Image (tube, rainbow, N blue to C red):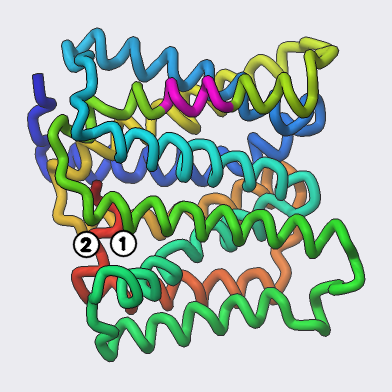
Amino acid sequence: MEPHPLRRREAIALLAAIAIAWGTSWPVIKAILQDLPPMWAMTIRSIIGTAVLFAISAFRRNLVLPQRGDVPVILNIGLLHMVAFTGLVTIGLQFVPAGRSVVLGYTTPLWVTIGARLFLGEALTLSRIIGLVVGLSGLLVLFDPSTFDWSSHDAVVGNAFVLLAALCWAVSILHVRAHKWVSTPFELVPWQALLATCVFVLLALIFESAPRIEWNAQLIALLLYGGAVGIALPYWAMQTVNRSLPAITTALGLLAVPIVGVISSSIALGEPLTLTLLAATALIISGVAIGLGDPIARFYRP
């Protein structure tokens, strides 16, 4: 049973909840890494998120077996977005402040614009070119040698992992845009999450073995929040929002994610709001917003 479209006010409220959920999940992951190695942090969050997604689908009577024609998109989103993006970001967060990471992670639309031109034959219109220039200038600000320590191995590797994560998400988006759907995105989300969980379990066992976890109330709360609110809620809610709001509205609304991420990281983790970070955030978000003046806005819609 397909979820019915929401009224505009309800859909906007749900979109705001998505932005808050995704934005606050960055400092939450950073905090979890104080008690868990990265692979197991990803694994436990993914198990919780997958369980919640299956429960939601069963409750709404949307739990169906995927069709053969949707196997490629399950593999794509499950591996490139849920595993590669989340995994690389989690590893990068060991070395990079959460606020900086969320800004780097949301350079994805810039890479989608370039990839859409190279692989999908989409035109680079004036607004897209201006958006790219403005957005990429934000990256130059972040990696200005006068403010970024290029001699620090951890800093370089950590930032590289997060940027690679953004590229993986971009590749996933480009494939989704070219995919011909059989089942609905709403019906496939739990299966994509289940695939990601299975991969995370294998990776954790291979690279980190069984961890010795010192359980405490704070860690449990962070994991529950990171799995249920950081994974299950936004993945489920995005499908409803996509059916209820124009793609451009959804895309612009999600530009609040890095803003929420930067602010919540400063409040929760005490990360400084430096002029460099604020300037880069403004430039990257502005670049994406300018580019959204074209149909590229559909990058958030499966």
Q: Which residue extends farthest front? A: 68
The type of residue carrying mark 1 is Leu
Percent position of residue 302, x then y? 24, 47
Above-or-below relation of 249 to 70: below
Crowdedness near tag 2: few (<14), some (14–19) or many (≥20) residues, C-alpha within 10 Å = many
Above-or-below relation of 76 to 226: below
Residue 195 part of the magenta-drawn span: yes
The magenta segment is 193-199
188 horizontally vs 204: left or right: left
Q: At x 85% / y 73%, what residue is drawn? A: 150
**114 and 259: which one is in front?**
114
Residue 252's mark? Answer: 1
**146 and 129: which one is in front?**
129
Q: Quadrant of residue 77?
A: top left
Real-space Cα distance between discs 1 and 2?
Answer: 6 Å
Q: Dot 2: what SS?
A: helix
